[in-house]
Amino acid sequence: MSVDTLLISYRLRADRLDEHLALLDAVYRDLARLRPPGFRYQTLRLDDGLSFIDVVMGPDLPGPLPSLESFGRFRAELDERCEQRSTAEFTVLGSYGMGE
C-alpha cells in the first residue's frame, strides 16, 4: 500500500484566528469519531500564533476529508482566512516515535 504525504503551510489573518480554530476543532472531532484506517492528520501551530503546518498522510489522499461536512466548512473560506498558503508533497526519509 502506497502512502501519500502532504505538507500544507499557511499564515492566518489575525482577525480570523478564533473562527479557524473552531472549524479545525470540528474536523478533528469528526476524525476521532470516524477513526479512518491508515489516515493521519496533524496540525502544528508555530510560535507566532498565526502560522500553521498541516501534515496529512494516508493511502489515496485526500482520504476521508472531502466526505466530512466539517472539512467542507473548514475549506470553504480558507483562502480568505489566510494571508499566505502553500502545499507540497514530501517523502519521509526517517522517523522515530512518530507512529507506524
Image (spheres, rainbow, N blue to C red):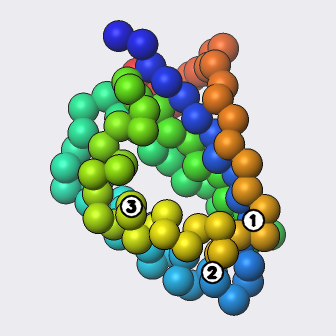
Occupied quadrant, residue 18: bottom right
Report if the CB atoms under discs 2 and 1 are less than 8 Å apart.
Answer: no
Task: Name the residue that disc number 2 marks.
Answer: 17
- Residue at horizontal 54 percent and vertical 29 percent from the top: 5
Q: CA distance from mark 2 to mark 3?
A: 17 Å
Secondary structure type for disc 1: strand
At horizontal 19% and vertical 56% (from top left) the residue drawn is 33
- Tag nearer the camera, 2 or 3: 3
Classify residue 19 as left or right of residue 13.
left
Give residue 44's position: percent from left, percent from top.
61, 54
Residue matched to label 1:
11
The residue carrying pointer 2 sits among few (fewer than 14), some (14 to 19) or many (20 or more) residues within 10 Å by Cα, namely some
Asked where in the image residue 72 lies, by quadrant, the reply is: bottom left
Looking at the image, residue 27 sits to the left or right of residue 37; the answer is right
Q: Please tell me the numbered disc located at residue 96.
A: none
Q: Give the vertical position of 88 relative to 46 (above or below).
A: above
Q: Amino acid at mark 3?
A: Phe
Q: Quadrant of the N terminus?
A: top left
* Residue that sits furthest to the bottom in the current view: 15
